[in-house]
Amino acid sequence: MSEIGLKPRTRTKPKVERPKLYKVMLLNDDFTPREFVVMVLKAEFGVNQDQAYRIMMTAHRRGVCVVAIYPKDVAETKAVRATDAGRKMGFPLMFTTEPEE
Ligand code: TYC
């Protein structure tokens, strides 16, 4: 006897949650030197000189700029490390995180 087509479909689709992504934001301030901001962006976010300069100038002109987007834990770690790099030098440089959309 053929059993073709009689087997109930019991396999469930594995539910893989997409990790929520967070934006790292760079906030402008009046004290941190431009070159220092560029240096931190390159060191912590792996952007090149040109990209770092553009990000820095966007924050400088508009008050804030999205630096990069990562899973939550990565975004928070990088924002803290980059902010600490400024604080160590006595600058009020500030990176924050916020959920993407
Ligand atoms: N506004 C700073 C200055 O004129 C430079 C700066 C740019 C600081 C961007 C922070 O997120 C920043 N020295």
Image (cartoon, grey):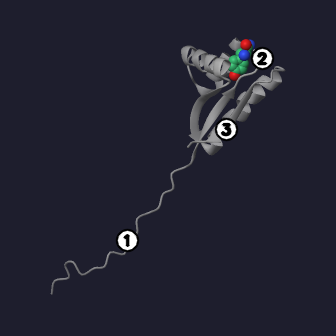
* Callout 2: SS: loop
Disc 1 to disc 3, C-alpha distance: 39 Å
Label 1 Cα crowd, 10 Å radius (few <14 / some 14-19 / many 20+): few
Tell me the SS state at disc 1.
Answer: loop
- Is the CB atom of the residue marked by disc 2 within 8 angstroms of ligand 1's nearest atom? yes
Q: Which kind of residue does numbered mark 3 sit on?
A: Thr
Residue kind at label 2, given as amino acid type: Asp
Per the model, the C-alpha gap separating discs 3 and 2 is: 21 Å
The residue lying at 67 percent from left, 27 percent from top is: 26
Above/below status of 97 relative to 9: above
Residue ID for mark 2: 30
In the rendered view of the protein, which quadrant contains the C terminus? top right
Distance of label 1 from label 2 (alpha carbons): 59 Å
The earlier-in-sequence mark between 1 and 3 is 1
Q: Is residue 22 above or below residue 66?
A: below
Q: Which residue corresponds to the image point at 32% horizontal and 75% vertical from the top-left? A: 9
Drawn side of residue 45 relative to residue 1, left or right:
right
Identify the residue under disc 3.
Answer: 97
Which residue corresponds to the image point at 71% horizontal and 28% vertical from the top-left? 82
Label annotation for residue 11? 1
Please, which residue is most extreme toward the front here? 62
48 vs 95, left or right, is: left
Q: Give the image quadrant in which the ligand numbered 1 is located.
A: top right
- Please identify, in this view, whether the residue under mark 1 or under mark 3 is nearer the observer: 3
74 left or right of 93 in image: left
Q: Quadrant of residue 97?
A: top right
* Amino acid type at mark 1: Arg
Q: Position of residue 70 (x, y in %)?
A: 57, 39
Disc on the earlier residue, 3 or 2: 2
